[in-house]
Amino acid sequence: MGMTYKELTEEQVIQVEALAAVLNAKQIADYFGINRATFYSMMKRIPEIDRRYKMGKAKSDLFVANTLMAQIRANDVRATMFYLRTQCGWSEKMTLDANITHNHVMVVPKIDREAIENWEEQAIEGQSELIANNT
């Protein structure tokens, strides 16, 4: 006797896109009452499931990226630093100067000004690339 495959209904295949925007593959499999390996097998066998899963993830990623870029445009320093670290390979390398006066030590951080000055250019390039890849 041959192997039987679990199948999703047409409605469930359509749901995969919306679910993928907020759930990972294991959670989607749990939602449909199947195990993760079965869901991955379906994605390999049925291109429409794979396409909808990837589209849902891409839409979610785009939403998050747009939200992050809005925060960067509003001069949110933490959002800017996060973007630079994760998308531009920037790191916060600090050197310390110690000024000793009257037995007290004052630590003054030095910040790589050139990296900070280039953040806007890098952010715009990253956004342009994201938009080009999603059109």
Image (cartoon, rainbow, N blue to C red):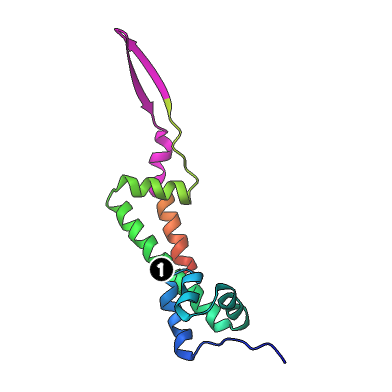
Q: Residue furthest bottom?
A: 1
Q: Residue furthest top?
A: 102
The part of the chain drawn in magenta is: 96-120
How many marks overall? 1
| Residue that badge 1 annotates | 60
Of residues 105 and 122, the one nearer the viewer is: 105
Residue at 33 percent across and 52 percent down: it is 72
State left or right for residue 104 relative to residue 61.
Answer: left
Residue at 35 percent across and 57 percent down: it is 69
Split into 4 quadrants, where in the image is the N terminus?
bottom right
Q: Residue furthest front?
A: 1
Of residues 79 and 114, the one nearer the viewer is: 79
| 91 shown above or below 26 | above
Residue at 50 percent across and 70 percent down: it is 26
State left or right for residue 53 relative to residue 102.
Answer: right
| 55 shown above or below 5 | above
State left or right for residue 20 relative to residue 36.
Answer: left
Q: Residue furthest left?
A: 74
* x, y percent for residue 6: 57, 86
Of residues 106 and 20, the one nearer the viewer is: 20
